[in-house]
Amino acid sequence: MKGCGFNRYGELGLGHTVTQPTFAPISVPFVASKVVAGPTASFAIDTNGYVYSTSARNIGDFAKVDRIGSVKAIDIATTATDVCVLTPTTVMILPAQMATSQIGSGPSRVFHLPRGEKQFSRISAGTFFITVICSSGAVYSSGLNSYGQLGIGNSDVNATIGVLTRVPIPGVTVHVTAGGCHALALSNAGEVFSWGRNDNGQLGLGHLRDACGPQRVKLTPPRTITAVAAGDFHSFVVTDRNEVLSCGRNNCGQLGIPGVPHLDVFTAVPIPWDGTAATVHHLQCNGGHEQSHTVVVAGHEVYGCGSDGCGQLGLGAERSEAISSSGGGGVSTAAEVTVSQFRKIPVEASPASRLACGWRHTILYQAIPLVMPPVAVGQSTLAGGRSKRTLSDIPVDVCDHIVAYLVVRDALSLSQTCWGWNDTVRHCNGLWETVLLNAFPDTARATTSKRGRVRSSLTRWCSFRPRGVG
């Protein structure tokens, strides 16, 4: 895990409160499943579902949040004032100050699973509202609705909806991202729906009128969307052709398109890929205090644009050159340090890297699956009634996740016995056979191709060194 940017409140988890202009290693006592960056703190979920937070009180280190008891989280998000912890059946709202200071008596509000739904799956949060997705693909929202950001068909400047309300989105939703006062939803058909505040064109609808309910985003020419991201007043989408498009406010260059104050339709972004165009694996954007930035992980490289007054892009010594080449100049305050075109950031990443963008800081981390995805169940059962699973019934990507989970768990266990990294890798290189024999007893049905994918997946996950391994 690495972080850069504003750090006065210890939000980077570096063990101090000094602002960091380049990505610096963050030492944490856990393996992260997800990290989110809030206004003045960062939060993480480990592979066991425990929640951690940073704060100046902890001298900037990540510390376990005890105020939610033994609850195992599956996702996490932050509003301007709260941290929102998602479990399979509840949404817990905890004031961020309480979480980082480890004081108080627990969540200030708890939402339960709506009737008829089986499980929550993901959560996203805007400035003062939340959106959650259920396993059925249904979306619910709650919070402030001054611009129609709840997507429930109406708006009221003074209205705050205190219950989870269904958002009428056609089809099955696979991802929702909440910006400042707007939201984007991605369907399983590759369509995007947007709603909420639109004074800068952040909904990508071709006008500047707010939308109180989900509106289908029309791209010209039509494209299939694979990922969405929302900042305070801007939005991004990624297509199946690896195109990156943006719209909304551009006061800090956060769209990656110089020379325009805002865009009300999604427009292709010229990213100067190093060599051939890389596959976009993750994109995040955020903003606050009139600063906003966007960061992209593509292959083993990271690119960024927008505000860098606090070092949140991690450009360091290369910042002056980036500002000059993108048309910036005459900088007098931190808020005015902007990079209006995507610039390669001097930090190493991998296809498994994920980003967390706060108001003025950024964290880059290796995402390890929290829980193993559901797998196909065979007809026979093992002792105790446990269903027997066979490798031939399991999708390849599930095998990837299983291997990733086991490798990192085992590697961290080995580090406690003071093994060196080379010894750890050598040991883990034999784990694939253990995965087949112990996790999936009926290996006779395993196909050659899937066994090969397990081996290659293991090799890939051993190619990076988890923090804490000796």
Image (spheres, rainbow, N blue to C red):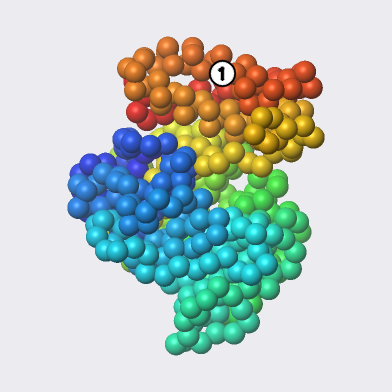
User: Which residue lies most toward the front here?
Assistant: 384
Tell me the residue at 47%/28% (across/down). 408
Is the residue marked by circle 1 packed among few (<14), some (14-19), or many (20+) residues within 10 Å?
some
> x%, y% of residue 123?
53, 59
The total number of labels drawn is 1
| Front-lying residue, 454 or 234 | 454
In this rendering, does residue 194 appear at all? no
Res 383 quadrant in image: top right
Tell me the residue at 55%/85% (across/down). 155
Question: In the rendered view, would you say 105 is above or below 52?
Answer: below
Disc 1 residue type (three-letter): Leu
Whether residue 397 sits left or right of residue 339 in the image: it is: right
> x%, y% of residue 370?
52, 42
Whether residue 72 sits left or right of residue 281 in the image: it is: left
Which quadrant does the N terminus fall into?
top left
Tell me the residue at 41%/46% (across/down). 50
In this rendering, does residue 94 appear at all? yes
Residue wearing tag 1: 431
| Front-lying residue, 101 or 317 | 101
Tell me the residue at 34%/63% (across/down). 106
> x%, y% of residue 113?
57, 65
> x%, y% of residue 67?
33, 57
Mark 1, secondary structure of its residue: helix
